[in-house]
């Protein structure tokens, strides 16, 4: 599969599966199993899995383009997808045992959905610092944890779980493990009823003395923190930026449609866009902001493809900028379309809510700004 093929497959899924069901799934808070099945059948769940493991072997550019395409139709599904790819990268870099490699092959074959389970109730948005601590149990470990904001909770086939290593001395002495769905002691511990991204099942989960065999350990003991920063964070932030870009494009498209199709009856049915230059100016600014975000996403991709001294700074910038751009563009769309947007006739109200969800997702915009400031001043991030 080439990047162009992947984008076209994503576009087909967006048009045929996502767009027709997005509003209903958002209203009901329904996770789209149909979308996951379509992504699997199209080979997109295995997008970044190496060819030798049965996947497409594509990189960050294809990932960003596919994610943005999905987000333009349904940001909830795009979030499920980007969390899956972020989790998949932990298998790509850390699957050493036959059991873990078998999971990677299932992902490559489109038969397995994975996700991340990093954030915990006790450390809140500091996703890199789990409170839970693994206890040695035979050849593996036993983990008890209160995980929060687990996208695809109870729908994913596996969860990439972080925990302090058994002999941890500090909050970053962590290890990553793969925990299978249905494992004893693993359960969803609350409902998901968010303001935005309502159809991605980001519910809390509880691990109660869940036993994880050593062959499902995805990092050496104590190297989970390193994997979070060097493997997960770049793909997660890029995915978040791509989701924001898709939301912006959807908001621009919906605004264009409204301004062209809505008319002043008392002015010989002239359209809103023809009659009101202030609305045209607001639309133009939305497009400027959206194109600026697209350029930023492309820049991050280029930095990940050819890493340099500014790569981590670009990674940190990408999510912060995308979150704020998506909020600004969807806010402008709400104002430009007025009552039609507020009364949910256009879909813009959903884009507005979905855009705000990204800003509170760890690492938050404020945390990223702090990290960037430290990076610019040469201060260690942790």
Image (spheres, rainbow, N blue to C red):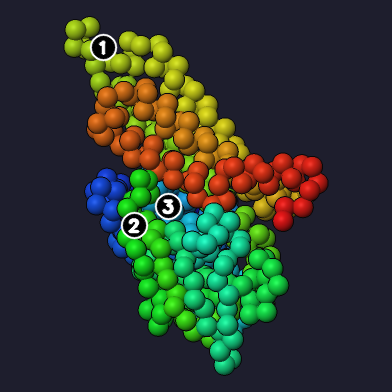
Residue 190 position within the rendered picture, expressed as x and y whole percent measured from the top left: 34, 63
* Outermost residue, left side: 265
Residue 94 position within the rendered picture, expressed as x and y whole percent measured from the top left: 62, 74
Q: Is residue 148 above or below residue 103?
A: above
- Which residue is under mark 3? 78
Residue 29 position within the rendered picture, expressed as x and y whole percent measured from the top left: 28, 53
The span from disc 2 to disc 3 (Cα, nearest Å) is 17 Å
Q: Earlier in the sequence, mark 2 or mark 1?
A: 2
* Outermost residue, top side: 267
Q: Residues within 10 Å of mark 3 (few under 14, many from 20)?
A: many
Q: Going 18% across and 11% down the picture, which residue do you hit?
A: 265
Residue 333 position within the rendered picture, expressed as x and y whole percent measured from the top left: 39, 28
Asked whether residue 331 is in view, the answer is yes
Whether label 2 touches label 3, CB < 8 Å: no
Mark seen at residue 270: 1
Query: Image quadrant for the C terminus?
Result: bottom right
User: Taking 25 as reference, is 202 left or right?
Assistant: right
Q: Is residue 158 above or below residue 340?
A: below
Question: Which image quadrant for residue 292?
Answer: top right
Q: Nearer the viewer, mark 2 or mark 3?
A: 2
Q: Going 26% across and 27% down the picture, which residue do you hit?
A: 340
- Which residue is under mark 2? 192
Asked whether residue 49 is in view, the answer is no
In front of the other: 22 or 159: 159
Disc 3 element: helix
Q: Going 45% across and 61% down the picture, which residue do you hit?
A: 148
């Amino acid at each position: 599969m080439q990047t162009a093929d992947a984008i076209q497959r994503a576009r087909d899924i967006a048009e045929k599966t996502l767009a027709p069901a997005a509003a209903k799934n958002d209203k009901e808070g329904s996770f789209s199993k149909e979308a996951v099945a379509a992504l699997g059948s199209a080979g997109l769940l295995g997008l970044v899995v190496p060819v030798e493991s049965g996947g497409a072997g594509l990189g960050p550019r294809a990932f960003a383009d596919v994610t943005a395409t999905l987000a333009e139709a349904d940001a909830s599904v795009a979030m499920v997808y980007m969390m899956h790819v972020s989790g998949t990268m932990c298998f790509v870099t850390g699957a050493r045992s036959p059991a873990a490699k078998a999971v990677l092959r299932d992902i490559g074959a489109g038969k397995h959905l994975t996700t991340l389970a990093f954030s915990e109730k006790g450390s809140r948005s500091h996703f890199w610092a789990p409170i839970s601590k693994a206890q040695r149990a035979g050849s593996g470990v036993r983990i008890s944890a209160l995980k929060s904001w687990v996208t695809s909770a109870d729908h994913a086939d596996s969860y990439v779980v972080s925990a302090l290593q058994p002999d941890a001395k500090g909050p970053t002495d962590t290890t990553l493990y793969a925990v299978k769905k249905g494992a004893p002691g693993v359960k969803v511990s609350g409902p998901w009823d968010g303001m935005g991204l309502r159809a991605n099942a980001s519910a809390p989960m509880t691990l109660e003395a869940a036993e994880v065999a050593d062959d499902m350990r995805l990092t050496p003991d104590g190297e989970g923190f390193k994997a979070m920063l060097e493997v997960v964070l770049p793909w997660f932030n890029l995915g978040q930026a791509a989701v924001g870009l898709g939301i912006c494009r959807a908001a621009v498209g919906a605004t264009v449609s409204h301004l062209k199709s809505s008319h002043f009856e008392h002015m010989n049915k002239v359209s809103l866009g023809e009659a009101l230059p202030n609305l045209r100016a607001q639309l133009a600014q939305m497009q400027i902001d959206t194109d600026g975000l697209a350029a930023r996403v492309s820049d991050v991709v280029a930095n990940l493809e050819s890493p340099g001294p500014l790569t981590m700074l670009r990674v940190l910038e990408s999510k912060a900028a995308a979150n704020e751009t998506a909020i600004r563009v969807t806010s402008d769309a709400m104002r430009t379309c007025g009552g039609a947007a507020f009364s949910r006739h256009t879909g813009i109200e959903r884009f507005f809510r979905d855009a705000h969800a990204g800003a509170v997702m760890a690492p938050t915009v404020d945390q990223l700004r702090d990290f960037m400031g430290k990076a610019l001043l040469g201060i260690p991030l942790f």
